[in-house]
Image: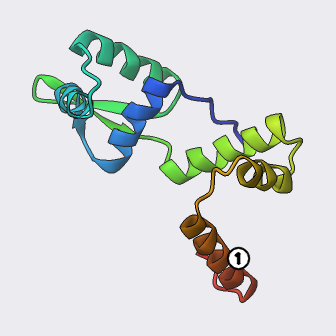
Amino acid sequence: MKETPLLTGLELELMQIIWKNEDVSVEFLRQQLADSGRPLALPSIRTMLNILKKKGFVNRRQVSRAYVYNALIKADEFQYNFIRDALNRAFSGSPTGLVTALLNRELVSKSELDQIKTMISDYERGKKK
């Protein structure tokens, strides 16, 4: 299986916008980032998109005089590879270690814990999502 490269914080922000939309322009990305309190200049966004293209996360095609970008890697594929990498690096491949860290640091709320319990119960009954 081909390994997915990791993303920086800004790269991940851009990818999250791209995953939610199709044919994303640089201007659309600029506006989305500005709306979320992270204004960036168009050249900076273009640079980041070129990096994402080199990493194999996006492709681009020309529409009129501008480029539009689409994801080459699905969000769930990235999330799977990210979690697998974190498990291997930080928890010696142990999902139990990850869950223990989440619980010990109180990073899971009561309502999230209830949701997780329901998911586990459903999984054990064969109702995978």
Q: Position of residue 74 (x, y in %)?
A: 49, 49
Q: How many labels does the image show?
A: 1
**Residue at the extreme top:** 43
User: Is residue 97 found left or right of 36 in the rendered image?
Assistant: right
* Residue under the image location 73 percent in, 55 percent down: 103
Kind of residue at disc 1: Ile
Using residue 99 as the reference point, say whether residue 68 is left or right of it.
left
Q: Residue 82: where, in percent of width, then height?
A: 65, 41
Residue reaching furthest to the left? 64
Give the labeled residue for mark 1: 120
| Left or right of residue 27, residue 129 in this image | right
Return the residue nearer the eye: 26 or 116: 116
In the rendered image, the vertical position of residue 41 relative to residue 84, given as above or below: above
Residue 64's quadrant in the figure? top left
Q: Position of residue 118 (x, y in %)?
A: 63, 80
* Label 1 environment density (alpha carbons within 10 Å; few <14, some 14–19, many ≥20): some
Residue 59 placement (x, y as % from top left): 38, 32
Say which residue appears at 84% left-offset and 50% top-offset: 97
Q: Is residue 52 above or below residue 70?
A: above
Give the quadrant of residue 30: top left
